[in-house]
């Protein structure tokens, strides 16, 4: 059984007892959070598709930790101009354990 859920404007495929990494959520570590924007549910070959959302369904999870993603290097250069700049960026993430899909 899995579902497609919209979290902070992005869509994630979630399964029960699996982890997902989302953009940083405002919830504290250890808190239970529910996602009501469920777009799609598949259960043993049976498909339930929302138009655009499935009413009455929700996915619950627990925020396990807040962390940062690996560093991404941002390098800009203009040839023959003597311009080059190098920056790094680490995206803040939240690790969420999916508890239940209804």
Image (tube, rainbow, N blue to C red):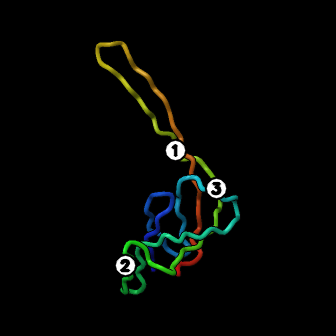
> Which SS class for mark 3?
loop
Q: Position of residue 24 (x, y in %)?
A: 58, 52
Q: Position of residue 37 (x, y in %)?
A: 49, 69
Residue name at image x 36 percent, y 83 percent: 47
Is 91 on the left-hand or right-hand side of 64? left
Residue for badge 2: 49
Discs 2, 3 touching: Cβ within 8 Å:
no
Between 39 and 72, which is closer to the camera in this rendering?
39
In the rendered image, residue 87, in percent from the top left (x then y), is placed at: 48, 29
Left or right? Give the position of 46 relative to 37.
left
Tell me the tag on residue 26. Answer: 3
Identify the secondary structure beneath mark 1. loop
Disc 2 crowd, CA 10 A, few/some/many (<14, 14-19, 20+): some
Cα distance, mark 1 to mark 2?
34 Å
- In the image, residue 18 sits, relative to residue 68, either above or below, namely below
In the rendered image, the vertical position of residue 79 relative to residue 66, given as above or below: above
């Amino acid at each position: 059984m899995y579902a497609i859920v919209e979290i902070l404007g992005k869509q994630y495929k979630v399964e029960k007892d699996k982890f997902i990494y989302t953009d940083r959520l405002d919830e504290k570590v250890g808190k239970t959070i529910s996602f009501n924007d469920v777009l799609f549910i598949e259960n043993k070959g049976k498909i339930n598709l929302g138009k655009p959302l499935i009413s009455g369904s929700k996915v619950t999870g627990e925020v396990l930790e807040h962390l940062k993603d690996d560093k991404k290097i941002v390098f800009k250069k203009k040839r023959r101009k003597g311009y080059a700049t190098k920056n790094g960026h680490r995206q803040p993430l939240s690790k969420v354990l999916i508890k239940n899909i209804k």
